[in-house]
Image (cartoon, rainbow, N blue to C red):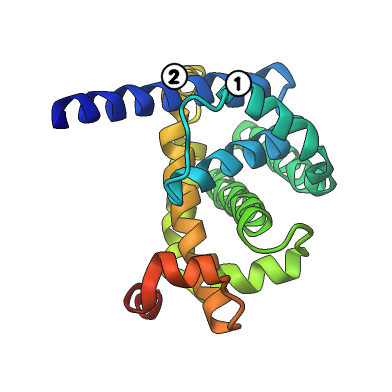
Amino acid sequence: MKNKFTLTAIMSAIHLIVVLSLVCFGTVILSMGILLIPALTSAFAVGKDVIYKRYDVYDGLIKRFFKGLVSEIGMMRYFPLQLIIIIQLAGMYAAEKVGMNFLMYLMVGCISFILTLIVYIVTYHIFYSSKPTVTDVLIAMFYRVHFFLLVWVAMLLITTLFSVKLMGVFLLIGTIVVLLVETVAFLGILGFKNLKKELTDEEKEYFGEEMLKMI
């Protein structure tokens, strides 16, 4: 019985990783990055159920993702952050042409920071407030600096190593990265909510006093 349960759990995890990776990053690629934030938001909504151990493999993952994508299209209000990334990428290209490598490194850091901010905005939206302001998110992001640094380093690695091959990897197993960065950002947001004494009863019961003290 135990082996059967373990095999079922493994198959469910594989299904989640592969299917969500394909639909999420496939949507991002086919939309040329325009739907990055809504797609990430929809994926994070699934990730929330994984974190709270409410995920049901029989729930129709593809249908749920696209339903979430449509309902979260309002997250496009943060699209100017993606425009900043595009400007930074253009600046990197120009800096490379004139041999100003130090500017390239600076812009890579800036792009990684904007990506981290996007991750935190989506996390804040999913776990805290439906319409967060960038100011609120920045305060929450820097409240627990160690969580912010972990997400920023992950985004820095993605930015530095970005290539067509890496995008292919994300299409197959990108959900792993999504769940990891979401979990880390969530812990930072949870700590901020705990500071403001705005935790839900579910969060208090699920995580317990000991863990809440640690974050």
- As helix, strand or loop, the secondary structure at mark 2 comes to helix
- As helix, strand or loop, the secondary structure at mark 1 comes to helix
Query: Can you give x and y, in whole percent of width and height, for residue 22 in the image?
Result: 54, 19
Q: Please tell me in which quadrant of the rendered image residue 36 appears.
A: top right
The foreground one among 182 and 98 is 182
Taking 148 as reference, is 90 above or below it? above
Q: Residue furthest front?
A: 1
Query: Can you give x and y, in whole percent of width and height, for residue 172 in the image?
Result: 44, 19
Query: Can you give x and y, in whole percent of width and height, for residue 107 in the image?
Result: 61, 48
Mark positioned earlier in the residue sequence (2 or 1): 1
The foreground one among 108 and 26 is 26
The quarter in which the C terminus is drawn is bottom left
Q: Please tell me in which quadrant of the rendered image residue 29 appears.
A: top right
Regarding residue 90, the answer to whether it shows in the image is no
The quarter in which the N terminus is drawn is top left
Q: Which residue sits at x=74%, y=70%?
A: 135
Q: Are marks 2 and 1 in contact (CB under 8 Å)?
A: no
- The 10 Å Cα crowd at callout 2, few under 14, some 14 to 19, many 20 or more, is some
Q: State how far apart marks 2 and 1 are (Cα).
A: 15 Å
Q: Which residue sits at x=63%, y=38%?
A: 40
Regarding residue 193, the answer to whether it shows in the image is yes
Specify whether 153 is left or right of 115: left
Q: Which residue is mark 2?
A: 172
Q: Amino acid at mark 1?
A: Ile
Query: Can you give x and y, in whole percent of width and height, for residue 61 in the image?
Result: 56, 25
The foreground one among 141 and 127 is 127
Q: Nearer the viewer, mark 2 or mark 1?
A: 1
Disc number at residue 37?
Answer: none
Q: Which residue is mark 1?
A: 62
